[in-house]
Amino acid sequence: MSNPLRMDISPRVVKVFRRHLTVYRRNWKVSLSFNFFEPLLYLAALGYGLGVYVQAIEGLTFIQFIAPALIASSAMFSSAYECTYGTFIRMEFQKTFQAMVATPVSMDEVSLGEILWGSFKSFLYGSVILFVILVLGLVASPWALLVPVVLLVSGLLFASLSMIWIGLVPNIDSFNYYFSLVITPLFLFSGVFFPLSGLPAIAQTLAWASPLYHVVNLTRGLVLGNVGMHLVWDFVWLVVVAAVLIPIAIHLMRRLVIR
């Protein structure tokens, strides 16, 4: 019996990624601006607005605390949107997948190309926010240069997770539930806006299973210069989970498209 998680992958996957990049170059200014302004609004409203009334958190002002975490959350949302709505539209309405698999490109390569594209969007939008907080003087350490690496790995994870949802619930209306029941809780309870030490012990334990929790730890630690072995373990956690999710996402997408 063949292994359903075995992947048919070759260097042709680069052509899939290049195709998405070529299309993106036509409207990158509009696309980037929308994803650029939302985190800025969070910084302005919460950091400079609400932050005036919030006491110091772990020796940091509120905006110093949330700014690095917004890099992580922006990266999560960008890859999640790209690999739910974006992937589904290319598959179901534009019939891009069907056109690509009519060439020597396999469905596995199409799926992996989608995941790599989602990772790139995570890297791109997260890096933009990193640049913004650098300009605002909120980057305290040269370790922040490693943040883009974290964004690429986290992008692989969230892109795979999003495509698993498509493979299990192939209906565009269901994406509302994905963002309401998965992405939004991660956004609210992964240490973006407050330390998890104030939550009950069970909630702190459950937070360890949140991918965004580990990304937030990494971005905040690197931006503020609080580095150590704890960040290594956070990064290893992301790599391992991404490595587990990628074959599952590819298998489910293959089963969905190649009926």
Image: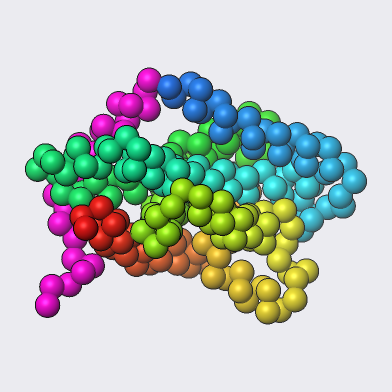
Q: Is residue 217 magenta?
A: no
Q: Residue at x 67, y 61 (%)?
A: 189
x and y percent of residue 129 in the render?
A: 58, 36
Coloration mode: rainbow
Whether residue 178 appears in this view of the structure is yes
Instruction: Give the magenta-colored segment's residue range.
Output: 1-26
The answer to whether residue 214 is seen in the rendering is: no
Determine the residue positioned at 40% across, 66% down: 241
Where in the figure is residue 124, as x and y percent of width and height?
A: 45, 36
Q: Farthest residue toward the left?
A: 104
| In magenta stretch: residue 14 | yes
Which quadrant is the C terminus positioned in? bottom left
In the picture, residue 58 is in which quadrant?
A: bottom right
Q: Nearer the viewer, residue 97 or 245?
A: 97
Image quadrant in which you'd find residue 103: top left
Q: How many marks?
A: 0
The residue depicted at 56 percent of the width and 43 percent of the height is 74
From the viewer's perspective, is residue 184 above or below residue 136? Answer: below
Nearer the observer, 9 or 147: 9
Rendered location of residue 36, percent (x, y): 58, 31
Of 229 and 157, nearer the camera is: 157
Residue 237 image offset from top left, x and y in percent: 45, 67
Left or right relative to 117: residue 148: right
Residue drawn at (53%, 56%) of the image:
178
Q: Quadrant of the N terminus?
A: bottom left
